């Protein structure tokens, strides 16, 4: 149980990586951008992969009427997400510590994992709806208007995950270092649960 | 009769067939070879050349950038000439670059580029080039590929034996080709002999910023100082200048300056003179020369007139200057990478003369002098001679080195490059050039560390090499592979202006330092507008200053009213882009100058004097986006008596 609890603590602490590394990354490549433009999505804001990428993405997006990429103070998510993550880290470490002193059952580890998964799914849902809004809520005065074969306006929503072709751009959207650290951390809490369960079964 | 005729024709036809068969057999062979050569110069689409070549534009006044081995031209860098392509020399920020003591001189004859060095090796920070006609030296940044500084050289005329630099870029030298009265005065040209002087200027280079300053001028006898080279390695601290017209003739020099069997290479111990000057030696002399500096932060050049220069009489610094007799009107003066051999190419001599630096020092130490000229000791030819290459060709001009003990000399009259061995003086190989070759360049061949893979020759005549373009064609360069024992001609490529001399360098030394944008945040132009809130128009009497921005695909403002006939309108235009290779252009109808081409993050000013009432358009000249054609605006020009207030707008109807 002690080992499981320590793994639980380590797993929760890995979430702290999100304060340093981006959660997600979207790259936009095109023939005239041999060095692709890119944005790194952090839990507290969006930054360009290279210094002027955001400015250049905004410059391109104005042709199709997209809004500019939001600054941290323009989206509530960027102030709430860090608090949620921090709370989850504290909660995870607390549960783990209580586990070390055998004050708490290993089942709390799973509880934490389920809570984190729900929050994660909600976060992804929120992120996706923002992408939909960003990609389809276009300025009616947009210079370039492209319609789908059925006549509806084309959406420029980047993919939530994976690769998609948007006009001349190849768009790739994948988790980044912070995201991977979070996934590893969450997996570790599952491992902690499993080890804890094994230990308690042995005892019986 | 008819039969005979027919059979004769048949025989001739057969012969022709055989002959042409033979020929085609031969050309097949060379075809195989040349396809091999084609591969050696082929740089596939999207791939980069391995070397940069900076080829002087000669009478274009500029410097052109080429890739090797492809021979593709990448850029023309404006230096001494106005350049409508980007408004250099037309825009208010760059006009000061072309100021001189003679006023605004928008052209020159740019000759010898030389890349800055550290410890004798190319360091790729700057490239220097001389203006031959109105004596000037320019320094060009190899991060921005822009001319950053131009200094005029007083007491000089025909700034030809320059711009060569010492092995740590301590000095860039500017020797005068024509001797002139110093100071200038009204006198009879017949009294040239003994009265004219040749100024050899040593221009110090600030190791950090590269800023130039004339440290001293050596006032030499009135010969013509043709070319020069710094010593290196063991001869570091010395500079060598070829001379002609040691006869000091003043008319029909073709004959009268070719009488002496030997002219001189002047050897200058600049370290000795530097020491003399640092101890207060020499005299300050009134002078008038421009020093033009371009500030990358303000994107603006300023021109300052300097009022004096330090001159040194060589006879006052014993042991600093010697004359090495060298056969007949030597042109090139080339020092090998070790610094031991000084090649004096006597252009009218049958042999190629090579002097030994060690022998020169010995002769000086043993005071073996043949006489003196105006107090400057002359050494004996035999005492300083290292050896000579016997009858290698006709009309030797210039020599470069491959770093493997070989020298390559161009022969103007016999139109060829000859490869020979230092020390044994034997000819190893010769290859024709097309035609009348002047200089040649090996990347780093002018330093202690040549990169001896390629050599290119720059020719004066191009006839039959390319599709004809009327009576005048661009000159040509020819690229040779020199990695083997024999030189191999790989490629012909046209050059712009007169490809006088060139400097070349492996691409990796500079390409990663090349600037991609100018940062708007670092733009300190006093009339910049780095966002739309800073856009404004200010009237100051008859001057109207428009603070304008540009970004794909609009100008801000795009409608301007309140300008009057007789006003002078200054468009201060800032390019807000922060994206590599996205300049915008600005052109105004009826402007009496040029367009502006403004790099990302840069500010440039175009002056326009509206002469007619009306509504006049301006537009972007550089196709910048899908809506480039829409990137335009109007200026309303009212009569001089009008009282319409200045106003401007963008996007509101």
Image (tube, coloured by chain):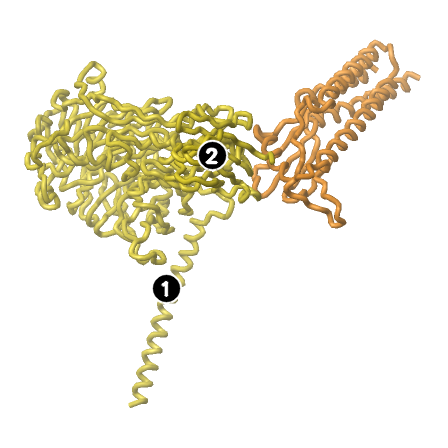
Chain colours: A orange, B yellow
Relative to B367, residue B14 above or below = below
- Which one is nearer the viewer's eye here, B600 or B419? B600
Q: Is residue B7 left or right of residue A148?
A: left
Relative to B412, residue B557 above or below = above
Q: Which residue is mark 1?
A: B26
Quadrant in which the C terminus of chain B appears: top right
> Which residue is located at x 43 percent, y 39 percent?
B613
Q: Chain of mark 2?
A: B
Specify the quadrant of the image occupied by residue A94.
top right
Residue A69 at what x, y percent from top left?
Answer: 66, 30
Give neighbour class at mark 1: few <14, some 14-19, many 20+ (Cα, 10 Å). Answer: few
Give neighbour class at mark 2: few <14, some 14-19, many 20+ (Cα, 10 Å). Answer: many
Q: Is residue B203 left or right of residue B639?
A: left
Q: Which residue is mark 2?
A: B599
Label 2 sits on a secondary structure element that is: loop
Which of discs 2 and 1 lies nearer the camera? The answer is 2
Residue A127 at what x, y percent from top left?
Answer: 75, 30
């Amino acid at each position: 149980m002690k080992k499981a609890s320590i793994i639980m603590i380590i797993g929760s602490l890995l979430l702290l990586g999100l304060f340093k590394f981006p959660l997600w990354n979207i790259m936009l490549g095109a023939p005239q951008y041999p060095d692709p433009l890119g944005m790194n999505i952090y839990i507290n804001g969006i930054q360009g992969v290279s210094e002027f990428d955001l400015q250049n993405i905004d410059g391109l997006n104005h042709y199709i009427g997209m809004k500019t990429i939001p600054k941290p103070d323009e989206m509530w998510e960027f102030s709430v997400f860090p608090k949620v993550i921090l709370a989850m880290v504290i909660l995870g470490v607390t549960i783990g510590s209580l586990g070390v002193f055998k004050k708490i059952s290993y089942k709390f580890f799973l509880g934490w994992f389920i809570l984190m998964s729900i929050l994660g799914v909600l976060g992804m849902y929120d992120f996706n709806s923002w992408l939909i809004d960003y990609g389809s809520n276009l300025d009616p005065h947009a210079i370039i208007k492209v319609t789908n074969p059925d006549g509806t306006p084309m959406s420029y929503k980047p993919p939530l995950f994976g690769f998609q072709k948007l006009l001349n751009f190849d768009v790739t959207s994948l988790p980044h270092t912070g995201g991977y650290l979070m996934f590893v951390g969450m997996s570790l809490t599952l491992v902690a649960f499993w080890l804890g369960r094994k230990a308690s079964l042995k005892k019986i | 009769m008819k039969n005979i005729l027919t059979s004769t024709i048949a025989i001739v036809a057969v012969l022709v067939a055989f002959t042409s068969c033979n020929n085609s057999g031969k050309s097949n062979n060379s075809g195989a070879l040349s396809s091999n050569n084609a591969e050696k110069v082929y740089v596939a689409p999207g791939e980069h050349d391995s070397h940069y070549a900076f080829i002087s534009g000669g009478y274009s006044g500029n410097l052109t950038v080429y890739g090797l081995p492809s021979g593709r031209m990448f850029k023309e860098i404006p230096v001494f000439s106005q350049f409508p392509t980007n408004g250099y020399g037309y825009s208010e920020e760059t006009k000061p670059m072309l100021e001189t003591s003679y006023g605004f001189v928008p052209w020159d004859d740019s000759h010898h580029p030389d890349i800055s060095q550290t410890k004798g090796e190319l360091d790729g920070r700057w490239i220097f080039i001389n203006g031959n006609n109105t004596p000037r030296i320019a320094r060009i940044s190899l991060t921005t590929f822009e001319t950053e500084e131009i200094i005029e050289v007083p007491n000089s005329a025909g700034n030809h034996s320059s711009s060569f630099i010492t092995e740590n870029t301590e000095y860039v030298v500017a020797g005068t080709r024509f001797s002139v009265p110093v100071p200038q005065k009204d006198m009879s040209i017949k009294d040239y002999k003994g009265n004219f002087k040749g100024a050899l200027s040593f221009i110090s280079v600030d190791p950090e910023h590269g800023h130039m300053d004339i440290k001293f001028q050596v006032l030499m006898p009135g010969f013509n100082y043709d070319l020069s080279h710094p010593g290196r390695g063991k001869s570091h601290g010395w500079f060598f200048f070829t001379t002609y017209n040691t006869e000091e003739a003043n008319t029909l020099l073709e004959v009268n300056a070719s009488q002496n069997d030997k002219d001189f290479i002047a050897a200058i111990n600049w370290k000795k003179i530097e020491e003399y000057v640092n101890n207060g030696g020499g005299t300050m002399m009134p002078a008038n020369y421009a020093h033009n500096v371009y500030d990358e932060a303000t994107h603006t050049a300023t021109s300052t007139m300097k009022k004096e220069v330090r001159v040194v009489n060589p006879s006052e610094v014993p042991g600093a200057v010697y004359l090495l007799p060298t056969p007949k009107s030597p042109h090139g003066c080339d020092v090998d990478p070790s610094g031991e051999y000084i090649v004096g190419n006597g252009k009218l001599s049958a042999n190629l003369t090579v002097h030994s630096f060690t022998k020169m020092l010995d002769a000086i130490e043993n005071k073996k002098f043949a006489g003196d000229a105006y107090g400057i000791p002359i050494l004996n030819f035999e005492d300083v001679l290292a050896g000579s290459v016997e009858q290698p060709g006709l009309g030797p001009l210039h020599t470069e080195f491959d770093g493997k003990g070989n020298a390559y000399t161009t022969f103007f009259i016999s139109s060829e490059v000859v490869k020979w061995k230092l020390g044994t003086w034997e000819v190893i190989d010769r290859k024709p050039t097309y035609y009348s070759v002047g200089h040649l360049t090996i990347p780093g061949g002018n330093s202690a560390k040549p990169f001896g893979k390629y050599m290119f020759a720059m020719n004066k005549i191009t006839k039959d090499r390319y599709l004809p373009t009327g009576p005048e064609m661009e000159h040509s360069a020819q690229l040779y592979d020199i990695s083997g024992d024999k030189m191999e001609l790989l490629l012909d490529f046209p050059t712009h202006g007169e490809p006088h001399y060139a400097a070349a360098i492996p691409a990796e030394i500079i390409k990663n330092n090349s600037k991609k944008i100018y940062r708007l945040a670092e733009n300190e132009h006093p009339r910049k507008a780095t966002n739309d809130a800073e856009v404004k128009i200010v009237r100051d009497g008859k001057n109207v200053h428009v603070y304008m921005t540009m970004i794909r695909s609009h100008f801000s403002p795009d409608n301007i009213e309140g300008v009057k006939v007789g006003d002078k309108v200054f468009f201060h235009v800032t390019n807000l882009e922060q994206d590599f290779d996205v300049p915008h252009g600005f052109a105004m109808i009826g402007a009496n100058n040029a367009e502006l081409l403004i790099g990302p993050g840069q500010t440039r000013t175009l002056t326009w004097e509206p002469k007619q009432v009306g509504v006049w358009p301006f537009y972007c000249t550089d196709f910048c986006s899908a809506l480039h054609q829409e990137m335009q605006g109007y200026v309303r020009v009212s009569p001089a008596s009008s009282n319409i207030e200045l106003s401007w707008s963008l996007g509101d109807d």
